[in-house]
Image (cartoon, helix red, strand yellow):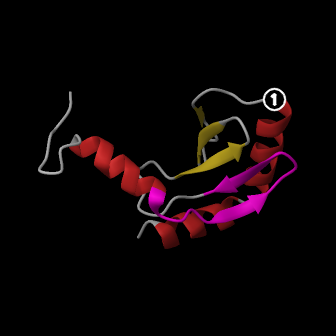
Amino acid sequence: MSVGGAGGAPLLERVHAVHYLVPMPTVHRLGHCRIAIYPMDHNPPHFHVLGVDFQVLVEIGTWRVIGSHPRGRDIGEALAWARANEARLRAVWQEQNP
């Protein structure tokens, strides 16, 4: 279902486009990917694992991977770093998503 607006494009598409125009701070860089958190993002608290040809979301604390899985090595490395740095991820989430 698409909700229209005065701008012509469906409202959800316009919101999605604005979301990706906001700078996303990189929290940490790994070998073939980086960990980032979008400001003004939706709950539950999560971070993005971004690679050249993939992007997945990982819920902070449960470590549930949302989206298609990248190469096992990349997600394993990202999850290991995240588990060891949970407090930092939560602090960045709170700062970016008050």
Residue 1 figure quarter? top left
Badge 1 element: helix
Residue 47 drawn at (x, y percent): 59, 51
Q: Tell me: residue 77, above or below residue 34.
A: above
Q: Nearer the viewer, residue 29 or 46?
A: 29
According to the picture, the residue beneath numbered tag 1 turns out to be 72
Q: Position of residue 49 (x, y in %)?
A: 67, 46
**Looking at the picture, how far across and down is residue 6, in whole percent?**
11, 50
- Is 40 placed left or right of 51 in the picture? left
User: Up-down: is 92 above or below 5?
Assistant: below
- Residue 89, given in percent of the width and then of the height, sits at 64, 62
Of the residues shown, which amino acid type is indicated by label 1? Answer: Gly
22 falls in the magenta region: yes
Along the line of sight, the residue nearer the viewer: 61 or 53: 53
- Name the residue rendered at 46%, 59% in the picture: 21
Looking at the picture, does residue 4 appear above or below residue 89? above
Q: Residue at x 53, y 65 (%)?
A: 23
Q: Residue furthest left?
A: 6
Q: Residue at x 20, y 32 (%)?
A: 2
* Residue at image point 45% right, 48% down: 44
Q: Which quadrant, please, contains the C terminus?
A: bottom left
Q: As drawn, which residue projects farthest toward the front?
A: 8
Q: Residues within 10 Å of mark 1 (few under 14, many from 20)?
A: few
Magenta region, residue range: 21-36
- On the picture, is 3 further left or further right than 62? left
